[in-house]
Image: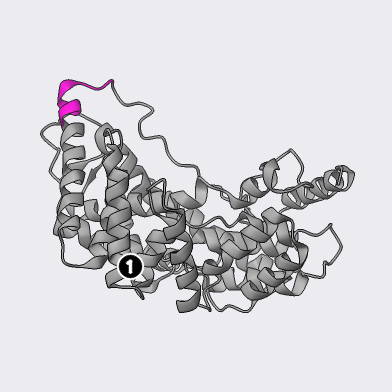
Amino acid sequence: MLRFASVVATVMAFAVAVGSFVSTASAEEAASSSSSESCTRPADPPTPDSPVDMPDYQADAEQPNPQQEAAMSAWRDYHQSVFDSLSRSGDPRDWALATLTMAVRFVANKQPQDQDRVTALLERAIRVAPDDSLILWIAAYANPAADHLALSKSAAQRLQHLEPQNAAVWLDDLNSAVQRKDERAIDAALARLAATTRFDTHTVELMKALVDVYQRYPSPDFNAALEGAASQEIPAELMPYAIAMSVTAMAGPPPVHQIINACRAKPGQTSVRAGDCASIGHVMIGHGDTMLANKLGYSVLRVSNTYTDEDVSSARNDDWAQEKVFERMLGKADPTSAQAILAFQRDWISTGSELEAMRLQLDRIDLPRTPPSDWADASSPFSSERLRKDAEWAEKAEAAPK
């Protein structure tokens, strides 16, 4: 058995807060707080979309001791060995995945040649497998090299050719149009997004591939080095999923906040983009692979004033599922929570939907998929507080210099 401990706290935090990238990066908040990307955006950010904060598992950790320092060194050495093994593989996907494992070496001192190796591995992978969407996604959006702009752009363009029905691959066009303040280009980009049928950030495919990597190359057992460290026991079989989740979260999705910017309308009014924004919102809600996509879809409907009573009810059901599942998985005193995490991640991979995995968890713990009538949805995207902040935004935008 392995234990939660400071040396692996970052990894396990990602595994326990399975939707961490939803809770730590609110696209709506970014859309309202980044003054460099909109001349009419108010200074005050709205309430973040997600009610779930990343637990601070290191808050009560003891100061590092020699045993923990040794364990951390072994941890870095382990990830270096995984990187080296994947780099020597004959599979081009392994070469691309190797570039992501470098990021998990945490505080390891990276050498300048690391960036060159990353770029070379991705270029070689694309050369051998030019139509592998996962390789292209890593090159376009998760490449840790600092000098990869040309590679990233060409990979993103290739993805648009291979996956024209995937809204996520068209985000770059919208982001570029918003940054240029080109209204016609924004309209065209939104129309292109509205014509898609899914919002796939390749999160599931990436997680599945990384789980396979860390099952092929198991992590060391740090139990002896960390004797007496913090305390919830988890099965060793969860560790590949935990590390895979941490690497996936570090890779992150492409910027999505410009959809919020482009779809905002004044409260009570309908913009000429309303139809496209409604279509985009529903694609993200119904055909997104992560809760981030689902939640942002509801926000798009709200800011564009295109939501219905059915959307409000659907959001309430989704918030109920997230709250109850996270309560179960974050219950550090509950010895079954580790098994719940493992079951959740396996369901996410098998169904391709984080939300569906949450619904299956509700079934597993004998909770209904819809909340009781007296349940208060504290995180509703359609709450009076959210609507009030939309009105404040519109008022400040109206008064801002053009």
Per the image, is 68 magenta?
Answer: yes
The type of residue carrying mark 1 is Ile
| In the foreground, 337 or 402 | 402
The span shown in magenta is: 63-70
193 left or right of 1?
right
Which residue sits furthest right?
A: 399
Per the image, is 200 magenta?
Answer: no
The residue to which callout 1 is attached is: 126
285 left or right of 325?
right
| In the foreground, 337 or 60 | 60
Tell me the SS state at disc 1: helix
Can residue 201 be seen by looking at this rendering? no
Q: Position of residue 251 (x, y in %)?
A: 40, 53
Can residue 293 be seen by looking at this rendering? yes
Which residue sits furthest left?
A: 224
Residue pictured at 34% horizontal, 49% vertical: 246
Q: Position of residue 135 (x, y in %)?
A: 34, 66
275 left or right of 259?
right
Q: Looking at the rendering, which quadrant does residue 127 occupy?
A: bottom left
290 left or right of 167?
left
Residue pictured at 36% horizontal, 35% vertical: 57
Q: Position of residue 126 (x, y in %)?
A: 33, 67
Badge 1 crowding class, 10 Å Cα cut-off, few under 14, some 14 to 19, many 20 or more, is many
Please state the total of marks drawn on the protein image: 1
Residue pictured at 39% horizontal, 53% vertical: 143
Q: Looking at the rendering, which quadrant does residue 66 occupy?
A: top left
Assign the magenta stretch its main secondary structure: helix
